[in-house]
């Protein structure tokens, strides 16, 4: 919950101010470290400052409301923007006084005052009126700096941040060797205090992600990182920074590079210091960790299952640790954004932190720098839609609308609506429209059989998928992109496009089920021209809403028979499909599995950041810092706890927990309008108690299990009307506030 004083609790409080979706725009950084220097003072004298800069002359403002009164909605607001703080303190504004605007909108409100100037600092505050007749006090004053040059459109971002970490453990292995464990791996570099009496010593530094027999593993394999450095301390006590050597592959032309104020980094958890004959204290060893600003207190999850709790912590931390570039990348091996990584990372980031800029920036980066798999081109449309649903902001969709149309790949479709990269339709014009210069190929999952050093007994991660001209997985993605393009067109008022894409989606769905579904076996085949049925050919149609309701049980029966026969990338869509089908027990079984193909296995092998693959044997060149392996960071809040936006910007929220056999769980989920809190205690088919907190200026649709027609649902001790939808009891239009729901049989 949000912390406020007792006197404030009965008031309507305005907090969490944002400019262009960014919080804390007043924060100033020095060489990556946050400072307490006010923004207006920092711009007046030279230092190696970093600022969050607003690139638009008409930024959008947002805030959150908090009220202990139930069913609170904003009915009006007033924004003041000024060129100096003192004016706002006095209650006046020289740039914009919106006056009282009758509106419930508290996000994405465009600036509408006098022209802002580049390279300038501005100040603003806001107050609101609610439907209870309460007028709030003005918020605290927030500030922001405009960029030196304005542009028509750009996603603004925070600078990369540094943090000093100290070892949680230092062992002296012998007279001259120390072993330090920082507890978790992160991307950073090392800073050391070293003493030398003579100035002739030679100290060896080892950094690594993996440990073996109590020491750093010098040959960890794959792309698991290990590095060695030599330091010759000068006479006396001095502080040394270990400058990380650039890796040729991850600092090449396609890679995203570290900003100079941070410097090159490497992922490591352990440090060994050899040939050092003097006492070494905890504060003598410092890891300068780099990450995109991240508030650990934005989210929380705990349950009655200890494995699930560990999987959550692994996944949540992975999102922070892999944010070191301010853009989602594939891990440390290449440091290149990929659409598949980005979609999973986007949803996971939304689940653990109130940040939307890194996801949007990565999505837009990939618009013009796409990667080669067919399905991943299509995922740009999925990312655009999720961005809109979580932010309620249309600016990105509007700016890249023509690109999104091209990335739906309708140019590759045949008379049935199927698309293919094998039928001669991938023309130079198509490639130019999607900004790709290369060979477009279907991927399904990764790696494929017989590559990257896989032995013959390891068949890759595609579950034996048979590639044909008409690929089931590719066309499932195409259907999803068509469906979303129709919705995007509707939002943007493009009626003819809306009808075009809706018609295409309906046509493809009919053909998909007519030509790709084996009715006798009750499964989808891999494509036209084969009778092979893989996990992938069934989980993607299930995840994307292609399976007819009367066939869901058949498809689920096949999916359960295949287990986790997919990569960590594929697991995102597998679990989405399972929870969409309402099989919460199987979803929980996979999330809490402890076998080789499980998130728990990532912990067991010794990593603190999610792996690129379930185990080294499934991808011999894998790395240990790959956020596409952190899907539980979104699957737990979105599917198990069931918190998703029903309308853009979380104006209406669905709360639909699917606990399965899980006895209890509680979560705090950040949204652009405030925190959603959900907790439950559960005895399957016997009793269920749900506690929720719904933020002000929103409403929710609450789903509870349906036990029987004789049941009664109590809301705060009083019977409440509900409707049955499948196996759920749905209570509509629940206003903001804290509520308790109990099912009485």
Image (cartoon, rainbow, N blue to C red):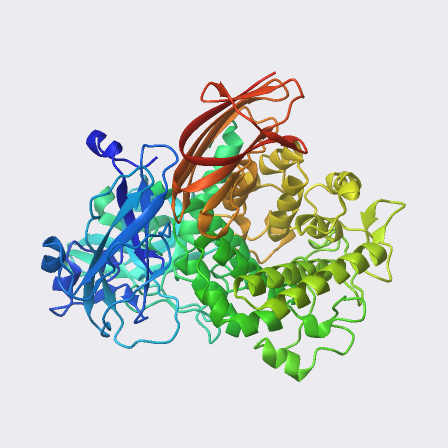
Say how many tags the image has. Answer: 0
- Give the image quarter of residue 62: bottom left
Horizontal side, residue 78 vs residue 390: left or right: left
- Give the image quarter of residue 724: top right
Most distant residue in the right direction: 520
Question: In percent of the image, x 54 and y 58: which residue is there?
Answer: 385
Horizontal side, residue 72 vs residue 283: left or right: right
If the image is split into quadrants, where does the C terminus sit? top right
The x, y position of residue 689, in whole percent, is 51, 22
Question: In percent of the image, x 71 and y 58: which residue is there?
Answer: 476
Question: In percent of the image, x 48 and y 57: which residue is there?
Answer: 387
Between 727 and 290, which is closer to the camera in this rendering? 727
The x, y position of residue 595, in whole percent, is 63, 37
Q: Is residue 501 above or below residue 323?
A: below
Between 119 and 415, which is closer to the camera in this rendering? 415
The x, y position of residue 135, in whole percent, is 24, 42
If the image is split into quadrants, where does the N terminus sit? top left
Q: Is residue 192 above or below residue 66?
A: below
Tell me if residue 301 can be seen.
no
- Give the image quarter of residue 563: top right
Most distant residue in the bottom direction: 428
Horizontal side, residue 543 vs residue 634: left or right: right
Tell me if residue 24 can be seen.
yes
The x, y position of residue 534, in whole percent, is 77, 51
Q: Is residue 366 above or below residue 462?
A: below
Horizontal side, residue 173 vs residue 383: left or right: left
């Amino acid at each position: 919950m949000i912390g406020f004083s007792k006197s404030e609790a009965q008031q309507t409080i305005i907090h969490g101010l944002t400019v262009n979706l960014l919080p804390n725009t007043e924060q100033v950084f020095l060489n990556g470290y946050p400072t307490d220097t006010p923004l207006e003072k920092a711009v007046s004298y030279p230092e190696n400052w970093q600022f969050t800069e607003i690139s638009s002359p008409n930024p959008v403002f947002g805030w959150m409301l908090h009220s202990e009164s139930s069913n609170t909605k904003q009915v009006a607001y007033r924004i003041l923007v000024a060129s100096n703080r003192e004016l706002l303190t006095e209650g006046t504004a020289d740039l914009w006084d919106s006056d009282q605007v009758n509106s419930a909108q508290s996000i994405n409100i465009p600036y509408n005052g006098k022209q802002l100037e580049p390279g300038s600092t501005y100040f603003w505050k806001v107050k609101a009126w609610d439907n209870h007749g309460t007028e709030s006090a003005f918020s605290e004053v927030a500030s922001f700096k405009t960029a030196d040059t304005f542009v028509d459109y750009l996603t603004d971002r925070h600078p990369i941040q540094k943090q000093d970490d100290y070892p949680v453990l230092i062992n002296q292995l012998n007279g001259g060797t120390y072993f330090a464990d920082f507890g978790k791996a992160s991307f950073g570099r090392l800073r050391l205090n070293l003493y030398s009496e003579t100035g002739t010593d030679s100290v060896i530094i080892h950094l690594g992600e993996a440990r073996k027999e109590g020491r750093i593993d010098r040959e960890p394999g794959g792309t698991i990182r290990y590095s060695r450095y030599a330091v010759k301390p000068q006479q006396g006590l001095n502080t040394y920074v270990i400058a990380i050597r650039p890796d040729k592959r991850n600092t090449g032309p396609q890679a995203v590079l570290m900003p100079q104020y941070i410097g090159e980094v490497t992922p490591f958890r352990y440090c060994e210091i050899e040939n050092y004959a003097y006492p070494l204290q905890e504060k003598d060893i410092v890891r300068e960790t780099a990450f995109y600003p991240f508030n650990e207190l934005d989210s929380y999850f705990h349950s009655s299952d200890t494995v699930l709790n560990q999987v959550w912590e692994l996944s949540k931390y992975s999102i922070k640790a892999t944010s070191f570039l301010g853009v989602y990348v594939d891990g440390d091996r290449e440091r290149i954004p990929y659409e598949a990584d980005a979609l999973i990372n986007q949803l996971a980031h939304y689940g653990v932190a109130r940040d939307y800029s890194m996801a949007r920036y990565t999505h837009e980066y990939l618009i013009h720098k796409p990667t080669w798999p067919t399905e991943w081109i299509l995922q740009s449309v999925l990312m655009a839609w999720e961005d809109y649903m979580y932010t309620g902001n249309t600016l990105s969709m509007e700016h890249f609308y023509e690109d999104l149309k091209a990335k739906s790949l309708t140019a590759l479709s045949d008379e049935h609506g199927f698309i293919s990269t094998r039928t001669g339709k991938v023309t130079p014009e198509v490639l130019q429209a999607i900004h790709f210069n290369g060979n477009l190929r279907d991927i399904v999952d990764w790696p494929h059989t017989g590559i990257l050093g896989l032995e013959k007994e390891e068949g890759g991660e595609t579950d034996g998928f048979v590639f044909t001209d008409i690929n089931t997985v590719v066309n499932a993605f195409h259907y999803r992109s068509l469906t979303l393009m129709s919705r995007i067109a509707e939002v943007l008022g493009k009626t003819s496009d809306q009808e075009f894409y809706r018609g295409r989606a309906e046509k493809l769905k009919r053909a998909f089920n007519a030509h790709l579904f084996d009715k006798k076996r009750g499964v989808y085949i891999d494509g036209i021209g084969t009778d092979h049925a893989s996990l992938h050919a069934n989980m993607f149609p299930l995840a994307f809403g292609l399976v007819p309701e009367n066939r869901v049980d058949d498809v689920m029966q096949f999916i359960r028979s295949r287990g986790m026969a997919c990569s960590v990338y594929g697991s995102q869509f597998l679990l989405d499909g399972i929870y969409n089908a309402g099989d919460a027990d199987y979803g929980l079984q996979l999330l809490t599995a402890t076998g080789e193909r499980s998130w728990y296995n990532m912990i067991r092998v010794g990593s603190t950041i999610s792996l690129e693959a379930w185990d080294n044997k499934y991808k011999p060149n894998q790395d240990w810092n790959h956020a596409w392996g952190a899907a539980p960071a979104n699957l737990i809040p979105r599917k198990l706890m069931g918190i998703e936006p029903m309308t853009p910007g979380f104006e209406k929220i669905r709360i639909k927990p699917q606990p399965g056999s899980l006895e209890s769980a509680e979560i705090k989920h950040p949204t652009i309008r405030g925190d959603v809190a959900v907790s439950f205690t559960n005895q399957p088919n016997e009793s269920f108690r749900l506690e929720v907190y719904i933020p002000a200026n929103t409403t929710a649709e609450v789903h509870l299990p349906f036990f029987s027609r004789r049941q009664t649902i109590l809301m705060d001790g009083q019977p409440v009307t509900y409707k049955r939808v499948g196996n759920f009891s749905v209570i509509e239009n629940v206003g903001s506030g804290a509520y308790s729901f109990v099912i009485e049989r």
